[in-house]
């Protein structure tokens, strides 16, 4: 349900509501190579909370030309598996397919996500989201959406 | 098509014809007359550090294997089985003494020499002949770690081709301890537009405050006055100390370093907040004390754009390459680099510096280049209007005293001037009107 809600908020461009799902010390990470260590190689994206806020801020300026006009997106989330971690944490693995319509074409982004969730004040917060695009090490055309 | 009159009509003093970006026949000619005629950047030595290391590369549309052969010599092999034409190597990178074609099993040493074919007794020919070795680029040279190749037997030596751009390139290399750096993956983008749109943009100071308005706002959102990132383009950029410098052969250099105070730490102060900053900066300051500012400057983007015609642009800490795929499709790959520090000049802080440097390098591809690429795609769409023929490049032209000639023959102009693109278009015209002496060796 959390994954579906995250997908819906992003499809609706409700970025502030989406950010509210994330913990104050979170990571949004898109590796450039499968399993690549971000301390040793550049990532497609490696955002802490502040940079994630930067990302949302930029998308809301209306002058981010790669998203002006904005993409119309539909996200499909499936193949969800849940693995317990610590007492109050969960690891969730899921597959995704994002349909991204912009400038007359629909493009597709595919991959699997790893989420690390923490139960806090009876709500689940996202601490880590790792987005593993199947073409992470390839030249990507306009990867400016939040996946 | 073979007359210089034809190209004189396409590239004029103040404008170029739209067809140089849209015409498939001109694109095909560029693959020989530009990419076949001059020294083209192929790879960085740090991507093939050991004997038998290889990496796939391109020279125009030609698939190459850039290899450090078993004797340590760097070669650029054509990734094309001599037999029927299939690629012999289907991996992006690796380590191999030989390459075997998956179709009929012909095998080559990584020197390019044919090792053997299955059942040679079924052939009347002598496989000792070099005819069946892999083709390779005849001239491959490394300039301080940057591997270039040319197919043109008449091209000048690489150092001469680089000419005036060597100085900023040397300075960029030498700011690193021991002059050493290493490529560590890349931010890889693609746009549906001609490759020259990216090179036209490589020293463009005119577009910054418009195209990158959202980036400038984002980087400066936590302070009252904008000082971060490329904020020195706000206000009156042509009156700022930065300048563009134009060399022979289509190379140019945007020097933004004069905008920044000359003291350790001043470059680092231009960086907007990014992941890990507080943690790693604190660690570096603990380890290095007074010397920390110099180390932090290495994690910051160097304030230069160093452009080597036709498709190499070094900016910040990145090595950026534009690969033409089709007349209207280009890969723009932003290779990230890290400091190596073999001599330990950074007192054990090199890993911390690099952890920061990787994050600063992610910023522009994520929040800046995507907007440039969107604009390049819009140009390609706009240029479909065939009667609307001209693409203007006349900013600064005809204003007395605006472009100054230096004693070494290079030109300097204010930051938003377009003299640099007029220069590389003249070079493009010259190359497209000239027959190069292209050859491969086996």
Image: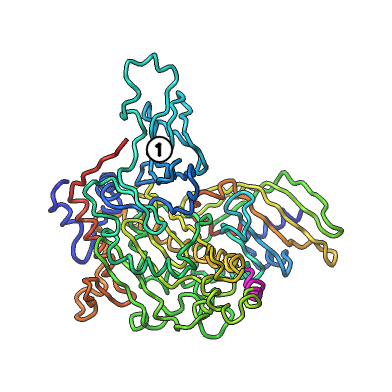
Which residue, as the protein is rendered here, is positioned at the far bottom? B224
| Helix, strand or loop: magenta stretch | helix
Residue B398, how many percent across, how many down? 19, 76
Colour style of the rendered protein structure: rainbow
Q: Most extreme residue toward the right, as rendered?
A: A87
Residue tagged by mark 1? B111
The vertical placement of B183 against B232, above or below, is above
Chain at tag 1: B
A117 or B379: nearer the eye?
A117
- Vertical side of A120 occupied by B119: above or below: above
Q: Secondary structure at mark 1?
A: loop
| Residue A11 visible within the image | no
Q: Report the quarter where the C terminus of chain B lies.
A: top left
Q: Residues within 10 Å of mark 1 (few under 14, many from 20)?
A: many
Q: Is B377 or A130 nearer to us in this picture? A: A130
Which residue range is magenta in the image? B275-283
């Amino acid at each position: 349900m959390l994954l579906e809600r995250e997908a819906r908020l992003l499809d609706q461009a409700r970025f502030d509501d989406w950010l509210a799902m994330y913990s104050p010390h979170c990571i949004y990470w898109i590796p450039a190579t499968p399993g690549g260590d971000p301390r040793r190689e550049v990532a497609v994206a490696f955002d802490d909370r502040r940079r994630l806020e930067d990302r949302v801020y930029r998308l809301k300026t209306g002058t981010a030309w790669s998203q002006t006009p904005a993409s119309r997106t539909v996200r499909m989330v499936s193949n969800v598996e849940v693995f317990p971690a610590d007492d109050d944490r969960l690891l969730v693995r899921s597959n995704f397919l994002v349909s991204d319509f912009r400038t007359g074409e629909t493009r597709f982004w595919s991959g699997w996500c790893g989420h690390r969730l923490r139960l806090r004040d009876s709500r689940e917060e996202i601490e880590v989201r790792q987005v593993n695009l199947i073409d992470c090490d390839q030249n990507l055309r306009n990867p400016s959406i939040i996946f | 098509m073979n007359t210089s009159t034809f190209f004189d009509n396409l590239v004029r003093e103040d404008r170029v014809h739209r067809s140089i970006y849209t015409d498939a026949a001109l694109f095909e000619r560029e693959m020989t007359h530009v990419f076949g005629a001059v020294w083209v950047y192929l790879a960085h030595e740090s991507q093939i550090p050991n004997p038998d290391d290889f990496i796939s590369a391109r020279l125009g549309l030609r698939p190459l294997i850039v290899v450090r052969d078993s004797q340590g010599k760097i070669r650029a092999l054509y990734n094309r089985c001599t037999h029927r034409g299939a690629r012999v190597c289907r991996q992006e990178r690796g380590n191999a003494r030989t390459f075997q074609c998956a179709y009929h099993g012909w095998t080559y040493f990584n020197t390019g020499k044919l090792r053997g074919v299955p059942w040679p007794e079924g052939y009347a020919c002598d496989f000792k002949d070099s005819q069946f070795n892999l083709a390779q680029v005849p001239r491959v040279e490394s300039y301080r770690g940057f591997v270039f190749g040319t197919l043109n037997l008449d091209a000048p030596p690489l150092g001469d081709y680089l000419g005036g751009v060597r100085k900023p390139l040397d300075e960029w290399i030498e700011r690193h301890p021991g002059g050493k750096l290493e490529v560590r993956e890349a931010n890889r983008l693609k746009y549906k537009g001609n490759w020259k749109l990216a090179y036209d943009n490589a020293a463009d100071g005119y577009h910054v405050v418009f195209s990158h308005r959202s980036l400038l706002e984002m980087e400066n959102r936590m302070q009252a006055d904008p000082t971060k990132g490329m904020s020195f383009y706000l206000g009156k950029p042509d009156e700022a100390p930065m300048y563009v410098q134009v060399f022979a052969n289509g190379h140019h250099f945007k020097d933004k370093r004069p905008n920044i105070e000359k003291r350790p730490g001043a470059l680092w102060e231009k960086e907007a907040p990014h992941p890990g900053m507080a943690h790693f900066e604190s660690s570096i300051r603990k380890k290095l004390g007074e010397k920390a500012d110099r180390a932090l400057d290495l994690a910051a983007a160097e304030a230069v754009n160093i452009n080597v015609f036709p498709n190499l642009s070094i900016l910040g800490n990145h090595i950026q390459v534009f690969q033409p795929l089709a007349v209207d499709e280009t890969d723009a790959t932003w290779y990230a680099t890290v400091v190596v520090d073999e001599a330990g000049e950074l007192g054990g802080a090199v890993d911390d510096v690099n952890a920061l440097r990787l994050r600063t390098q992610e910023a522009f591809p994520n929040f800046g280049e995507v907007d440039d690429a969107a604009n390049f795609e819009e140009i390609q769409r706009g240029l479909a209007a065939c009667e609307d023929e001209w693409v203007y490049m006349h900013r600064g032209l005809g204003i007395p005293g605006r472009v100054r000639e230096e004693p070494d023959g290079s030109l300097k102009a204010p930051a938003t001037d377009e003299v640099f693109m007029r220069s590389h278009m003249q070079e493009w015209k010259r190359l497209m009107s000239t027959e190069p002496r292209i050859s491969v060796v086996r």
